[in-house]
Amino acid sequence: MDNNALTSDTFNFPKIKKRTFFNLTVFAFIYFFFNSFLLPSGLLYTILLTPVMIVWLNSEKVSLVKVFGCFGILFILFYCIHNLSGVDSKAYLVSSTVYLTCVIFSIAFYVYINKYNFTFEPILVKLLKFNFFWVIIALISFPIWKQNNIFWYSNEITESLKFPRLKLFTTESSEYSALLAPIFFFYFAYFYHSNLGKKRFWLSVTIIISLLCSLSFGVIGLIIITITLLLLYDNIGKKRIKNNSKLIVLYFSVVVFILIFILGPGSNTGIAQRVLAIFSGNDSSSNGRAVDSYTLAEIILFKKNVWFGIGPGQLKIVGKDIINDFYQYDNSDDKVVRLPCNMAEVLATFGYLGVSLKLFIEIYLFFRTKVSSSSFRLCIFLFIFFFQFVGSNIVNTLEYVMWVMAFSKVFPDEYFKKIAYNNE
């Protein structure tokens, strides 16, 4: 027996060397908790660790020659097209390099999730325990620190109410909650197939507490929409509904109760007012992501090429004055210029052709990889598909992780129906 192999009676999985498992766990912790911790805005550890991922992929016998070749050809082609309208070559090259790191990260995660997916849940357990430990510390710190700190930052809930929102070591609560979303869906799949178990139940509770403390209405709302669509799809298509009648009744009862509370006795609370403001179109944060971003993208787009966009790295150059004027910022301010929405940023950067190509690839892979055959993968796809229209950005590693999980043929329904990982 290999003494370096990770083995346990509770795992019915292939063996893996302890060193490999440890390295994967460390990388997962960096990605989830510390990807941007103490780094300048826009820089991530997953970008800095790209050489490490290249070395690891090489050790896994994955050749990147074709990847670099295809990327190089596309870079030259788009640079020539964008250069016709004029570009800042240095900014173009820097942003394109960051795009390349995202491609390498996606390939590395694809290799991991397809070859080492049996380590996914054991690593999640470690992540969630570590996460909840710091959530407890953050809650203890809540009455002590009234101003922004490492765990919380004050955010305007309504025009008259500001409230701290949990972010832990990430840059903002929406990022933190979005990182929790795929983990929530993973444990929801166990619940959906009546195989949650006691330990998974308590881990699920820690996820829900973390999400509620983040007060990220966008992410929580999308989770609710995703589950609703899953239940509707399974009932209309008569899929996966044999043992879920109680779940369906419970779920819709909770949703109805929340709506009655928001519209009735809880209508005067700050949280209810924020929810009502979102639905009435009077919430500045949601408007900025879902409306203003597209308005600004089109204004910026028509400055250059509507079909191919302005090019990578040009938003902060072409769009600075436009965005500052739109929001009445001081033009002398060094405020980071960005569009807080992935699809709006794609529209500005790569034009209508870029948006069309992105949507075509997503829909094609949805059917090609039979996403709907897995309740977990379907939840992941639905969430990130809608999320790209109201948040995120082009180099958001979370989005790449979720797309890879959605399109990888892993974690079928059978995985969640059996005792894949002894968690009773």
Image: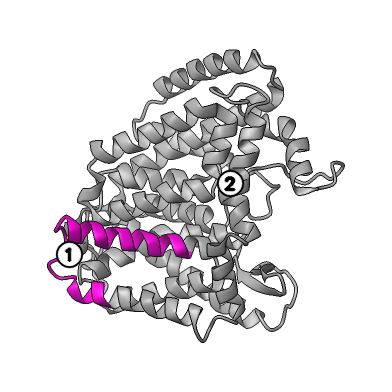
Mark 2 or mark 1, earlier in chain: 2
The quadrant in which the N terminus is found is bottom left
Amino acid type indicated by mark 2: Tyr
Q: Position of residue 73 (x, y in %)?
A: 49, 15
The location of residue 227, given as percent across then percent down, is: 33, 62
The residue positioned 72% from the left and 74% from the top of the image is: 160
On screen, residue 331 above or below 305:
below
Q: Which span of residues is magenta-colored?
A: 220-249
Labelled pair 2, 1 in contact (Cβ < 8 Å): no
Q: Which residue is mark 2?
A: 45
Q: Quadrant of residue 156?
A: bottom right
135 or 111, which is in the foreground?
A: 135
* SS label for mark 1: helix
Secondary structure state at the residue bearing disc 2: helix
Above/below status of 356 relative to 291: above
Q: Residue at x 53, y 37 (%)?
A: 50
Mark 2 or 1: the one toward you: 1
Which of the pair 370/409 is nearer the observer? 370
Q: Magenta: predominant secondary structure element?
A: helix
Q: Residue 417 bears which disc, if any?
A: 1
